Amino acid sequence: MTDTPIADMPDAPRRSLSARLSDWYFAETPNPAKRVQFSRPLTPWIFLLPQLAIVVIFFYWPSVQAVTSSFYIEDPFGFGSTFVGFENYTDAVTNSQYASTAWFTALFCVVVTALSLGLGLLLAVKADKVIRGAETYKTLLISVYAIAPPVAGLIGMMFFDMHMGPFTKLFAAFGYDLRVGIDYWDTAFALTVIAVWKQIPYNFIFFLSGLQSVPVSVREAALIDARSGWRRFKDIILPLLAPTAFFLLVINITYTMFDTFSIIDVIVKDKPANNPMTLVYKVYLDGFKGNDIGGSSAQSVILMIVVAALTVVQFRFLERRVHYG
Amino acid sequence: MQKIKPFDHLILILGTLFLCLPVFMALMSSTHTAIDIHSNGLFLTPGDNAGPTYTKVLTARGGFTGDVTGLRMLMNSMIMGIGFAVGKIVLSMMAAYALVYFRFRFATVIFWAIFTTLLLPLEVRIMPSYQVMSTLGLLNTYTGLIVPLLASATGTFFFRQFFKSVPDELLEAARIDGAGPVKFFIDILVPLSRTMMAAIFIIMFIYGWNQYLWPLLMTTDETFYTLMRGIKSILQVWVGSQIPDYNEAFALAVLAMVPPVAVVVIFQRMFIKGLTESDK
Amino acid sequence: MAHLSLTSVGKTYAGGVDAVRDVNIEIADGEFIVLVGPSGCGKSTLLRMVAGLESVTHGDVRIGDRVVNRLEPADRDIAMVFQNYALYPHMNVRDNMAYGLKNRGETKSVIAERVAEASRMLELDPYLDRKPRALSGGQRQRVAMGRAIVRQPAAFLFDEPLSNLDAKLRVSMRGEIRRLQRRLGTTSLYVTHDQLEAMTLADRLVVLNGGRVEQIGAPLEVYHKPASVFVASFIGSPAMNLIDARVEAGRVLVGSHDIAPAATDAGPVTLGLRPEDLSLASTGLPVAVEHVEELGAQRIIHGEVAGQPIAIADSSASELGETVHVAATPGKIHLFARDTGRRIDLAAAATGLAHAV
């Protein structure tokens, strides 16, 4: 006797189709952002429409196109294209220039991130400590944030100019011939200095606001528990800064991968011969200068995966770390 | 309390010099002549050539076609910065409002569709984006310069966080007071968000003003050049010339720096609040 | 102004959780009703259903003669005062009060007149041009009241309006709310978890537990004749002593001690004794004293009887030994069925001679 007699079913009130449709449409979401929400069929879509339209046209359409064209080789004269499967990917990955670019990008990321995080933290800790002139230091240090990367590149280029650049002269005084734009590692050095210079203020702002949100009572408790300032910093303050630091780590890596584009473009000036560059710059060069749309798209897709993974890691970790705060 | 050691100040002074001295020297050098810079290097003191250099950079027609002046580029940069910031605030406030304050089917799907854009910066899909723009005939237009950059949901994310922190009772009180969705948005939520809007405006203005790669691709017509695009073209002219126009390049750099730096310095407190609260 | 009626009202959430079940309340015009219960008992949900902020899943809510189940909050002719006041932070006091009237399309002169009247009544005149953040907690509370008053609604709904205030202010605001309500004669529904607030404000109390009504009645009626163990333990401070007892041959026994006569069936019962209905006696129920709280006017003696905790409110100043004997005031004992927790009516027996043993 497993059949449930129909008579035992609870009385389902007879409801009109439109009532059932509206119940389905306004079904309560599992975690509503608000205890009470409006239930209007059209209004939310009117508010969403502009953003959705832009996202679809300028985000999803090109993104899908990047993926599709990565599987094709386009005729250089624009006469159709041929499906080649993963050939663009294998070509890109096995290309020795791609390998060296990827290698440089990784190295560049590590060095720029480490230096700009370290210096940003150092300056933030000191600015948090001093009282006299704190506001002046803060304003001066933060102001550089607003300078655009290409402007930073231009100023940097002048400083490393082979005729009159102060850095070139400084190195010459020590007997080293700095040839930025010609020598691979000299250019890499200049790029690193400029990229770090541009990024310090950002890290400084976040570390300083992180430090200033450490409660006074915690600082005072630390003052009682630990004699040495370094111990207090290492055991108490640094762990409290960890969420900020982790957030900045990811941001700095994405910065070095993408926002340095304009610095490189200004310093290298479309003359990539024997100059270091990042993966993003190579996507641009192969696509716009080399007209290799398939290859450029394949590289784009690889980059997309790397960045998406980074961002997902950031969200996951951040959410977990934030609970410590 | 803790003692202040001169060592702390030393580090801060060195750091400040490292960050600010290049900017200062760029400013000073822009007031000298190109020959002066070429033979003596960069300057720490003002020269007497500021008038001619800035007049030339601002008013002389430059570029390959001779269509664009520095003033025009300054205006285009302004349009880019303000247009982007305003567009961003309007779009993202509306979208965030719909996501937070309405109950409707597909809300979750829409949420993810919008926030996936945070994963991928424009740079990784630059090539197909260019193709889409040329298909739509948006190359060399202000729309093409500004609108595609609005596709990232940073602002929406920020306003969503902010709206969620607005007490529920405010909506309930407004509903009892007879406010519908549009009235609540305009009468209550928008005025309530004024500080946040200002903070976001500052950050987005700087972001829009500082755009480089996108204008580089979108504009071949020099009347649409921004200052960032101008920097690229002034450097391209250098190739092969005897003494590069160092002074003009510096002057252009100064023009490109002053508005965003001024905004940050003047609205420092608001800017930091917006930055540290939106990115987290 | 209108009467309010809830008929078999219930709320089932999407997950199948019943927050409110089968509530029936008839509220007369001008009555002050307090919904009281512990957190999570459904009292706020019930209030919000009346306000139209939660949908009604079962039954009918009537305001006046209209069923309002499907009406927007603004169309229900009610006004609500929130726990955190919910004042619009960017509007000054005057605009906060006027906003609802503006939305209803009242003329400027009507709005000005009503705001002026409410502000006079609540002594808000000096603050009309201030923003809420420039007001103290008590002043904000008054603005929230003013916003409700200007609407001249059929009913006021209060959602724990005093719990964000400090203890002293709470007492004075309590009086102010009661006076105002009397003067305006507006039907009011008031939610609180504070039984003292409930007792002092209500014409009638509605005690809720687990989404159900435990008892409806005037404060003293609920106090003197709690309908269940839950009501007995919730209303009154210090709380009623609830002691396992049994009835044998028409008498209530705790252990081997005879407490009082009880004309009810033999079997296990819960015996309820209010601390203030117990007094020290030379003989009687022996209580092992554990500690004593001195309150000045009286003291609360905490002890143990037959392995169960008991409290006695004592106003005498006599020396206490390790064991004291207590007697219950005749007619002031409560019996509850052990299985259902419902009150066993001793009306017949209580008139008799309940006496200390």
Image: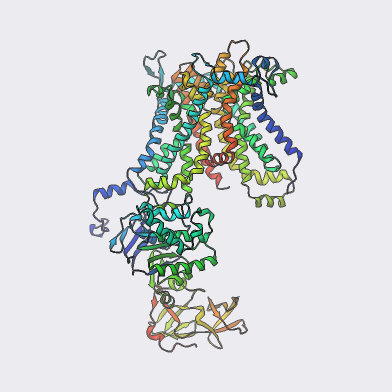
Q: Give whichever of B70, A132 is nearer the camera.
A: B70
Q: Is residue B209 left or right of residue B128?
A: right
| Count of numbered badges drawn on the protein | 0
The percent position of residue B239, horizontal first and vertical second, equals 58, 12
The percent position of residue A68, horizontal first and vertical second, equals 40, 25
The relative height of residue C278 versus residue A163 in the rendered view (above or below) is below
The relative height of residue B21 versus residue C139 in the rendered view (above or below) is above
The answer to which quarter of the image holds residue C315 is bottom right
Q: Residue at x 50, y 73 (%)?
A: C237
Q: Quadrant of the C terminus of chain B?
A: top right
Q: Give whichever of B13, B37 is nearer the camera.
A: B37
The relative height of residue C194 versus residue B197 in the rendered view (above or below) is below
Q: Is residue B260 left or right of residue A296?
A: right
Does the rendering let one see residue C145?
Answer: no
Residue lying furthest front in this view? Answer: C109
Q: Give whichever of A95, B224 is nearer the camera.
A: B224
Q: Give whichever of C116, A80 is nearer the camera.
A: C116
Does the rendering let one see residue B201?
Answer: yes
